[in-house]
């Protein structure tokens, strides 16, 4: 069993000792050496024991089982599950600075982390391409083993040495990659910190990808909001879920004045774009991994599920489906209108220069023109509805409202 005893490390700080079972699920948390550097939401998880909290954290570090065609890829690798796959790359990621090490070894963060060291593209190619045979000397050393989300994703190192995330799209609903680029442009024009997305076309596969540089670094890591909320009971039905979230952040040591303006601005633009999938795992906070100092809200990323993505072309002409009360929202309310009513957007967004968005319409036209899988009618309606929502947002910010 000693072969299955591991140390969880935070850079070179030994955080705790645990034991894997034969399926690489965490069986026992043996000892905690540094509680302060333990991943957020493990030791003080509201509903789970420390061992189960560690397993919950570990399981959310792996590729989700719902990833398209994942089962066939694992079978080709002769691997039981994504937990075993993650174990093969020491649990490393390009999101934070945690990793695992067999107790009997002596490895250093500097020698293996993906910020300073190259990594293999074998896993990325396997997850993206229809590979039926593995190359010789297949290399598991990749941050792709810890990539979250259902869409295909892979990390790469561009010609300037920057780590970039390439995110796939759906051939049958090819709007998400374009939405990422449009949202990125909107956030840019409004001077809101964001991940900068570009469009990439794989012509041989007739599919589009979005590409964005990593916003973490050797010293700054990302902690998603879900880990913050794991330490607290679910919000009761009769309280403002937005204010409850703020209070949980403050109790976790993140000062309100450090992030609230950026948070509200993000949700206000989400309202404009009709983003239906801003859940607790695709926004969060930046933290210095050595001092544990919170730096503020992370740049906005993952806005692909917006601009009526998934809605049938014919329904774009029906006000019922495009009304904010009928557009899904997360995480504070079930629809966009109710969520907007919960956030103090007039307090924090009155200085947003929405007039700077005048150029977005020609940008959207030119961008969507490249999408040959999108009907002309849909392209026109998406741009028209975006204009309507921007104009309505301007009225919302007028002093008399």
Image: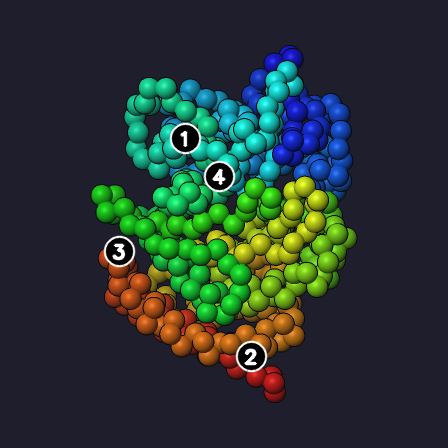
Q: Secondary structure at mark 3?
A: loop
Residue on which the image places disc 1: 120
Disc 3 from disc 4: Cα separation: 27 Å
Q: Secondary structure at mark 1?
A: loop
Q: Earlier along the polypeptide chain: callout 1 or callout 2?
A: 1
Disc 3 from disc 2: Cα separation: 35 Å
Is the image coloured rainbow, by chain, by secondary structure, or in one colour?
rainbow
Q: Is residue 217 visible?
A: yes
Q: Is residue 42 visible?
A: no
Residue on which the image places disc 3: 373
Label 3 Cα neighbours within 10 Å, binned few <14 / some 14-19 / many ≥20:
some
Q: Marks 4 and 3: in contact by CB < 8 Å?
A: no
Disc 4 from disc 2: Cα separation: 38 Å
Label 1 Cα neighbours within 10 Å, binned few <14 / some 14-19 / many ≥20:
some
Residue at the spot x=42%, y=20% of the render?
78
Residue on which the image places disc 4: 147
């Amino acid at each position: 069993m000693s072969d299955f005893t591991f140390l969880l490390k935070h850079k070179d700080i030994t955080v705790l000792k645990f034991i894997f079972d034969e399926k690489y699920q965490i069986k026992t948390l043996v000892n905690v050496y540094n509680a302060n550097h333990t991943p957020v939401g493990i030791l003080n998880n509201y509903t789970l024991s420390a061992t189960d909290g560690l397993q919950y954290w570990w399981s959310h570090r792996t590729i989700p089982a719902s990833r398209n065609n994942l089962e066939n890829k694992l079978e080709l690798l002769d691997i039981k599950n994504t937990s075993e796959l993650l174990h093969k790359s020491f649990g490393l990621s390009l999101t934070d600075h945690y990793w695992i090490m067999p107790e009997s070894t002596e490895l250093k963060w500097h020698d293996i982390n993906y910020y300073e060291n190259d990594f293999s593209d074998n896993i990325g190619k396997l997850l993206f391409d229809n590979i039926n045979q593995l190359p010789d000397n297949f290399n598991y050393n990749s941050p792709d083993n810890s990539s979250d989300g259902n869409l295909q994703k892979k990390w790469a190192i561009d010609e300037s040495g920057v780590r970039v995330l390439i995110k796939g799209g759906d051939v049958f609903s090819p709007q998400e990659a374009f939405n990422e680029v449009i949202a990125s442009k909107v956030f840019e024009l409004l001077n809101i910190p964001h991940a900068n997305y570009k469009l990439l076309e794989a012509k041989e596969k007739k599919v589009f990808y979005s590409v964005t540089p990593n916003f973490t670094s050797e010293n700054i890591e990302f902690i998603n909001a879900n880990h913050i909320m794991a330490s607290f009971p679910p919000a009761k039905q009769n309280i403002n879920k937005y204010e409850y979230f703020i209070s949980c952040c403050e109790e976790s040591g993140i000062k309100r004045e450090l992030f609230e303006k950026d948070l509200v601005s993000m949700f206000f633009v989400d309202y404009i774009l009709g983003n239906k999938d801003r859940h607790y795992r695709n926004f969060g906070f930046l933290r210095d991994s050595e001092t544990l100092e919170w730096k503020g809200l992370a740049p906005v990323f993952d806005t692909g599920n917006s601009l009526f993505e998934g809605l049938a072309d014919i329904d774009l002409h029906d006000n019922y489906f495009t009304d904010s009360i009928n557009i899904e929202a997360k995480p504070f309310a079930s629809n966009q209108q109710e969520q907007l009513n919960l956030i103090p957007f007039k307090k924090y967004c009155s200085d947003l220069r929405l007039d700077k968005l005048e150029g977005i319409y020609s940008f959207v036209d030119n961008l969507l023109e490249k999408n040959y899988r999108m009907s002309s009618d849909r392209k026109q309606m998406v741009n028209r509805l975006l204009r309507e929502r921007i104009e309505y947002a301007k009225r919302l910010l007028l002093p008399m409202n």
